[in-house]
Image (tube, rainbow, N blue to C red):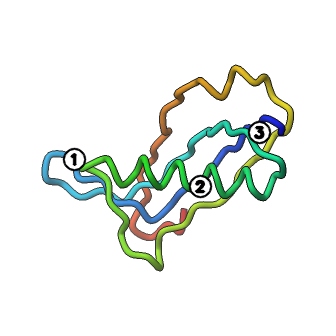
């Protein structure tokens, strides 16, 4: 097993801030134990989707517009990173932007 650090880029997420809808994208670092980069990617995506579904102010715009892609993947990183809990970096998507 190896330790992987994966940076995911998500788009197609809605954020309800005090009743005002915002279309947002995000970046999120996720650290996982895995035997392959493919398996690590799936674990990371599952973790992020689980977190998003637990946040009441966040929701998927729709299944077609939601996207979660790997921005960067690193192998054999410090195993202690598994225990870190880094937050999301959100950005607002402009109406005519494709993010």
The answer to which of 14 and 53 lies nearer the viewer is 53
Label whose residue precedes the other's in the sequence (1 or 2): 1
Which of the numbered marks, if any, corresponds to residue 17?
1
Residue shown at the point (83%, 39%) measured from the top left: 1
Above or below — where is 1 with respect to 97? above
Helix, strand, or loop for circle 2? Answer: helix
Left or right for 20, reference 26: left
Helix, strand, or loop for circle 3? Answer: strand
Q: Position of residue 62 (x, y in %)?
A: 38, 75
The residue where tag 2 is placed is 45
Are the residues tagged 3 and 1 within 8 Å (C-beta)? no
Measure how far apart labels 3 and 2 are at the Cα level: 13 Å
Which of the numbered marks, if any, corresponds to residue 4?
3
Measure how far apart labels 3 and 1 are at the Cα level: 33 Å
Q: Position of residue 76 (x, y in %)?
A: 86, 32
| Mark 3 Cα shell of 10 Å, populated few (<14), some (14-19), many (≥20) | many
Helix, strand, or loop for circle 1? Answer: strand
Left or right for 19, reference 82: left
Residue shown at the point (50%, 61%) measured from the top left: 11
Q: Position of residue 54 (x, y in %)?
A: 33, 48
The answer to which of 94 and 57 lies nearer the viewer is 57
Label whose residue precedes the other's in the sequence (3 or 2): 3
Q: Position of residue 84 (x, y in %)?
A: 58, 24
Above or below — where is 83 with respect to 7? above
Residue shown at the point (32%, 60%) measured from the top left: 59
The answer to which of 11 and 75 lies nearer the viewer is 75
Left or right for 19, reference 47: left
């Amino acid at each position: 097993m190896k330790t992987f650090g994966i940076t995911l880029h998500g788009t197609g997420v809605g954020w309800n801030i005090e009743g005002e809808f915002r279309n947002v994208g995000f970046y999120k670092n996720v650290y996982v134990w895995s035997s392959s980069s493919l398996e690590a990617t799936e674990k990371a995506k599952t973790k992020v989707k689980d977190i998003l579904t637990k946040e009441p102010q966040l929701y998927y715009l729709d299944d077609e517009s939601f996207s979660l892609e790997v921005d960067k993947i690193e192998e054999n990183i410090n195993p202690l990173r598994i225990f870190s809990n880094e937050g999301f970096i959100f950005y607002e998507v402009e109406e005519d932007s494709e993010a």
